[in-house]
Image: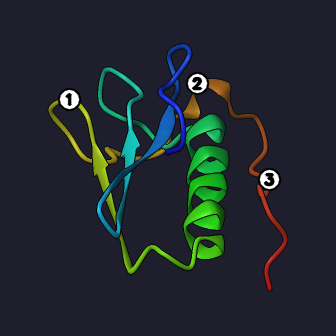
Amino acid sequence: MDKPPTGKETVRLERTGDVGLILVDHPPVNALSQAVRKGLIAALARVMQDATLRAAVIACDGRTFIAGADIRGSTTPRPVAQPR
């Protein structure tokens, strides 16, 4: 949001006025991997901490929105954050 991405990021946060745009880029179908889940949590936390943002939109690069779980890197499901 404050600086351009330095490399290929799975989830990035951009800003247009007072709207945060959370973009998922995990080809080929934007599967919900552990990295995507962690990236979404981090981006949402940044949005919540920024009092100047009035809304957030989650979108995906490519041809699909989140196509489902990415089971390639999974063995046992585990939470990425503790429930509140």
Left or right: 60 as drawn, with respect to 46: left
The mark closer to the camera, 2 or 1, is: 1
Toward the viewer: 70 or 58? Answer: 58
The residue sitting at 60% across, 49% down in the picture is 37
Left or right: 84 as drawn, with respect to 19: right
Element type where label 2 sits in the image:
helix
Task: Report which quarter residue 29 is drawn in.
Answer: top left
> Residue type at mark 1?
Gly
The answer to whether 65 is drawn above or below residue 72 in the figure is below
Q: Please rate how many residues cluster around mark 1, counting C-alpha atoms within 10 Å: few if below 14, some from 14 to 19, many from 20.
A: few
The answer to whether 53 is drawn above or below residue 30 in the figure is below
Toward the viewer: 50 or 61? Answer: 50
Q: Residue 27: x, y in percent?
A: 35, 22
- Of the residues under marks 2 and 1, which one precedes in the sequence? 1
> Residue type at mark 3?
Arg
Q: Please rate how many residues cluster around mark 3, counting C-alpha atoms within 10 Å: few if below 14, some from 14 to 19, many from 20.
A: few
CA separation, marks 2 and 1? 20 Å
- Of the residues under marks 2 and 3, which one precedes in the sequence? 2
Toward the viewer: 17 or 27? Answer: 17
The residue identified by callout 1 is: 62
Toward the viewer: 5 or 17? Answer: 17
The residue identified by callout 3 is: 78
The residue sitting at 58% across, 24% down in the picture is 72
Q: Residue 76: x, y in percent?
A: 79, 44
